[in-house]
Amino acid sequence: MAYGLALITGATSGIGEAFARELPRATGLLLTGRDEPRLAALAEELAEPGRHVETVAANLAGDAGRQALIARAAGLPIDLLINNAGLGYFVPFLENPAEREGEMVQVNCLAPVLLTRALLPGMLARAAEKGGRRAGVIVVASTAAFYPLPGLATYTATKAFDLSFAESLAGELHGVPVDVLALCPGPTHSNFFDRSGLPNPKSAAMASPRQVVREGLAALGRRTVHVVGGANRLAATATRLAPRPLLQAGARRTMRRWGRRRRAGED
Ligand SMILES: NC(=O)c1ccc[n+]([C@@H]2O[C@H](COP(=O)([O-])OP(=O)(O)OC[C@H]3O[C@@H](n4cnc5c(N)ncnc54)[C@H](OP(=O)(O)O)[C@@H]3O)[C@@H](O)[C@H]2O)c1
């Protein structure tokens, strides 16, 4: 399905940038992130005659940034909303300043909720007007939504929130002309690992942002949760079935090992 105009949060790198690149040329773009020069360069590269490509620099960790983005987006005929911006901090909870813990909740949870709440009524009205058209909402969650990860407590919880939010919203909007998808990538090549302080997993275990996006766009309208990659899908299913204490013990061991790798990398 070709959308008319997509709003992509977190479009300056990684998965968000790949969404901007992979959407068909018939789809206009409203790109947002904090890095203004990066946004401008991407917009210039993707612009072409007749295509609406616009940028809004906004910090989604604050009310002012969220409201500025909503104000601009509300004036445009957005029909695909991609809630992708996100961040994590791999650090013991008690060692991370409270503002940073809050930042994850603001960007990963509050921003998608407020953007979706603000834009969805217009998206639905336009879809209904154009009889037979559908709107789309993608929330980028993570495979981290399926299990506990000590050292990433708040991040993991925000991604479980994203999964639950999208899944529940999809149920609530059944029969309405909008498709909602919780997209759950596993480890993916992007700035995420360096920024979060996580040690990089082996390259072979990582997806490319392009693969994530292609799977996500293909899944939109077909299902409400999509885990990227066969091995991740198997792991997500297994973790849903495994006894919780077993899962917690396994996660504790894995995250201790990751913590040792991070400390070794710092030395
Ligand atoms: N990479 C992975 O392994 C992986 C796995 C599962 C899920 N995910 C999820 O995928 C999404 C995209 O991450 P990525 O892997 O593409 O990482 P990334 O390359 O670090 O991209 C993150 C994007 O979020 C934006 N962002 C971060 N903080 C922001 C803020 N305060 N205000 C506005 N924008 C902000 C960044 O833009 P600016 O810096 O310009 O603001 C950037 O465009 C996230 O939701 C992440 O949780 C990633």
Image (cartoon, rainbow, N blue to C red):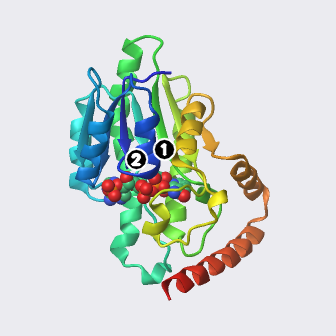
Within 10 angstroms of label 2, few (less than 14), some, or many (20 or more) residues?
A: many
Secondary structure beneath dot 1 equals: strand
Which residue extends farthest bottom?
267
Q: Are marks 1 and 2 in contact (CB under 8 Å)?
A: yes
Q: Residue at x 69, y 52 (%)?
A: 232
- Examine the rendered structure and indicate whether residue 131 appears above or below residue 178: above
Seen in the image, is 171 located left or right of residue 22? right
Q: In which quarter of the image is residue 47?
A: top left
Look at the image and tell me whether residue 260 can be seen. Answer: yes
Residue 129 versus residue 185: which sits nearer the camera?
185
Which image quadrant shows ligand 1?
Answer: bottom left
Seen in the image, is 228 located left or right of residue 121? right
Q: How many marks?
A: 2
Q: Residue at x 56, y 37 (%)?
A: 214
Residue 135 in percent (x, y) is at 44, 26
Q: Which residue lies under the disc numbered 1? A: 139
Q: Residue 155 carries which label?
A: none
Q: Quadrant of residue 98?
A: bottom left
Q: Report how far apart the C-alphas of labels 1 and 2 lie in the structure.
A: 7 Å
- Examine the rendered structure and indicate whether residue 211 appears above or below residue 93: above
Secondary structure beneath dot 2 equals: helix
The amino acid beneath tag 1 is Val
Q: Quadrant of residue 129?
A: top left
Residue 147 versus residue 217: which sits nearer the camera?
217
Q: Which residue lies under the disc numbered 2? A: 112
Which residue extends farthest top?
131
The amino acid beneath tag 2 is Pro
